[in-house]
Amino acid sequence: MQIKDMTTEQLQNLIRNTVDEILDEYFCDIDRMITPLNPPL
């Protein structure tokens, strides 16, 4: 499916999921409390 064929809701969900995944990868692994500023020992 191309973006131009998506509904507004589908596009919003795609953007939210993408941003959420990137923020999770970059900022924090909640289970282990590891962040770029607090790397694992």
Image (cartoon, helix red, strand yellow):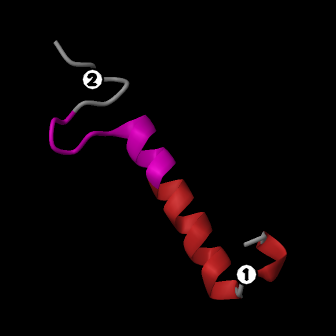
Please, what is the three-letter code of the amino acid marked with disc 1?
Met
Q: Relative to 4, is 21 above or below? A: above
**Residue sitting farthest toward the right:** 4
Q: Relative to 31, is 41 above or below? A: above
Question: Per the image, is 9 magenta?
Answer: no
| Labelled disc at residue 40 | none
Quick one: label 1, few (<14), some, or many (20+) residues within 10 Å? few
Please, what is the three-letter code of the amino acid marked with disc 2?
Asn
C-alpha separation, residue under disc 2 versus residue under disc 1 = 39 Å
Answer left or right for 1 relative to 23: right
Residue 38: percent from left, percent from top? 27, 23
For residue 12, what is the image quadrant? Answer: bottom right
Question: 36 or 6, which lies in front?
Answer: 6
Q: Relative to 2, is 5 above or below? A: below
Query: Which span of residues is magenta-colored?
Result: 21-33
| Labelled disc at residue 38 | 2
Residue 14: percent from left, percent from top? 59, 68
| Labelled disc at residue 6 | 1
For residue 15, what is the image quadrant? Answer: bottom right
Mark 1 falls on what kind of element? loop
Q: Residue at x 55, y 75 (%)?
A: 13
Quadrant occupied by the C terminus? top left
Question: 39 or 15, which lies in front?
Answer: 15
Answer left or right for 3 relative to 17: right
Residue 1: percent from left, percent from top? 72, 72
Q: Nearer the viewer, mark 2 or mark 1?
A: 1
Question: Per the image, is 28 magenta?
Answer: yes
Q: Residue at x 39, y 46 (%)?
A: 24
